[in-house]
Amino acid sequence: MTETELSGTGSFDAVGFALGLRVRDVVHHPDRERDGERAVWFYAHTDGGWSTTVRASPGSG
């Protein structure tokens, strides 16, 4: 999955829809890009758990 696919378009997108079906109790939120990197946060609805991943933008280093 590419960063663009995970980040979505801000409106309805197929990847976000599919993630919602496959991982029902988790929501993901892509942060804005900062210094060539973007964090994507994952929040669990059931137990308050969370996780994040940080991806460097292509060509940023």
Image (tube, rainbow, N blue to C red):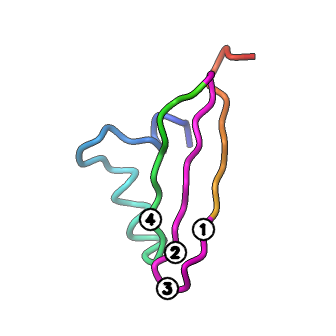
Q: Mark 1 — residue?
A: 50
Q: Which mark is residue 44?
A: 2
Identify the element where label 1 is drawn. strand
Residue farthest along the right direction in this orientation: 61
Q: Whole-percent x and y of residue 30?
A: 48, 45
In reply to whether residue 26 is colored magenta, the answer given is no
Q: Mark 3 — residue?
A: 46
The answer to whether residue 36 is above or below residue 21 is above
Magenta stretch in the rendered image? 35-50
Asked if marks 1 and 2 touch (Cβ < 8 Å), the reply is yes
- Separation (CA) of disc 1 from disc 2: 6 Å
Q: 5 left or right of 12?
A: right
- Separation (CA) of disc 3 from disc 1: 11 Å
Identify the element where label 4 is drawn. strand
| Residue depicted at 44% across the width and 65% down the height | 27
| Residue depicted at 33% across the width and 50% down the height | 14
In reply to whether residue 48 is colored magenta, the answer given is yes
Q: Whole-percent x and y of residue 61?
A: 75, 16
The three-letter amino acid code for the residue at tag 1 is Trp
Asked if marks 2 and 3 touch (Cβ < 8 Å), the reply is yes
The answer to whether residue 6 is above or below residue 47 is above
The three-letter amino acid code for the residue at tag 2 is Ala
- Separation (CA) of disc 2 from disc 3: 6 Å
Name the one closer to the observer, 57 or 33. Answer: 33
Identify the element where label 2 is drawn. strand
Q: Mark 4 — residue?
A: 27
